[in-house]
Amino acid sequence: MRCHKQMPVPPLAWPTSPGDVSLTFDGNPPEHSDLLPVVFPSMTRLKSLDILALGFMTFALFLGAGNIIFPPSAGLSAGENIGPAAVGFLLTGVGLPLLTVVALARVGGGLPALTTPIGRWAGIALAVAVYLAIGPLFATPRTAVASFEIGVQPFVGNSAAVLFVYTLVYFAVVLFLSLTPGRLVDRVGKFITPVLIIALVILGGVAVFAPAGEVGQATGAYRSEPLVQGFLQGYLTMDALGALVFGIVIANAIRARGITDSGLITRYCVIAGIIAAVALSLVYLSLFYLGATSHELAAGAENGGQILSTYVNQTFGAAGSLLLAVVIILACLTTAVGLLTACGEFFSDLLSLSYRTVVIVLAVFSLAVSNQGLTQLISVSVPVLVGLYPLAIVLVALSLMNRLWVSQRRVFMPVMAVALIFGVADGMAAAGWGGYVPQVLTRLPLAAQSLGWLVPVLVTLAISCVVDRACATRRQTSA
């Protein structure tokens, strides 16, 4: 039967795939064309400014106080060997986080999806450990205390009451920014990060074009193995763990802009990671050079914070302390927002609680922990983070290479188990319990550099790949 009257098509009855219907009728856009971005989500694209803002947001999430303090210290020790030391630092301080973002983007942006091959409960246990360590137990409170001691304490002094007032205001701002994660790109990427970048450009530009002196001599282990030492310094920034947490934040920020196509989400995550990696590299290189040229000025400095403070006071005078305070506070603030948002989204899904309730509880808990002091936090957190890091690196590497084998579980399970064993051993050694670690583990190659897990993991990976291929071939032959 032929209909003589054309009936309007209700919006909800439209096909959900662009391939199901022609987008034009006689050369003209169809009725309800204003609904196309909703009905055909794959047509939605981010503007160039939004992509840049997303990259800036990703950069700000990674750049914490530790990322600003480690490079000057490494540069001071590297001296004339600044080149190989900086390359080593960039490999682990920039390369590993970027690879982690790519791996998470491929699976949808979440750590639970990344841990699927090791089983549900093992994946949940690892995810909970990572989120707690990089979130409310250690890293989030540490951003508040570090920003206070480096940026605020020189102006107001050090007392428990002042620290409490500062952390109360600090976490109030962090909570405000975290309650609406869909607006992180606007609030962080378009407003806070540009201010941070301007301050860093001033600091880094002056460090490069107006150095404190000539490049000094290498000291300690940087004389013989600068590449390895730089690698270890970047390794200790723990940004790969941070990337495991921030991956879901980046992906959700993209979805909040109306992007639902998985291919586009992956592409934008990778672009954001590349923008952040380039920006981080520039910051690290300028701060490396600042440290390498500050031998005379910062003689006797015990950490990168003291090197930075001495340099900015020498170069900018009284305004230097204010500039450093702005850089440190903004860097820590944006990192805390990313950590609280990621932990809130993870635990709200895991516990079936509202996101708002979870982030409020986590913010209050982080406030309480932060008032225990920076020294106590670092002493407790370092062994835990060192123990988790091998697991994070191995998980990301296996996820990126998952097309090389037939059964992911046959490879993931044994390799991750070996990484866990050696991660626990490294954590115990970092906690001062090295006497309880079997001596055979301490005699492995690179064990002294907390990389004793590397050779056993590679050997286990090779054996697992052979077994995987053999089992696949046997199954095909039987079939």
Image (cartoon, rainbow, N blue to C red):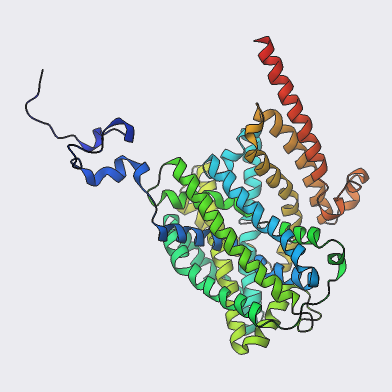
Taking 320 as reference, is 237 left or right?
A: right
Where's the C terminus, which quadrant?
top right
Q: Residue at x 77, y 77 (%)?
A: 215
Q: Is residue 371 visible?
A: no
Q: In the rendered view, tell whether residue 305 sits above or below residue 372.
A: below
Where's the N terminus, which quadrant?
top left
The picture quadrant where one finds residue 86 is bottom right
Query: Of residues 77 and 69, which is closer to you in this image?
Result: 77
Q: How many marks?
A: 0
Residue at far left of view: 4
Query: Of residues 289 and 11, which is closer to you in this image?
Result: 289
Residue at far front of view: 27
The picture quadrant where one finds residue 309 is bottom right
Q: Is residue 352 visible?
A: yes
Where residue 256 appears, x then y in whole percent?
40, 51
Where residue 275 appears, x then y in whole percent?
54, 59
Query: Of residues 352 and 104, which is closer to you in this image?
Result: 104
Q: Residue at x 18, y 34 (%)?
A: 9
The picture quadrant where one finds residue 166 is bottom right
Where residue 450 appears, x then y in whole percent?
81, 53
Taking 214 as reference, is 240 left or right?
A: left
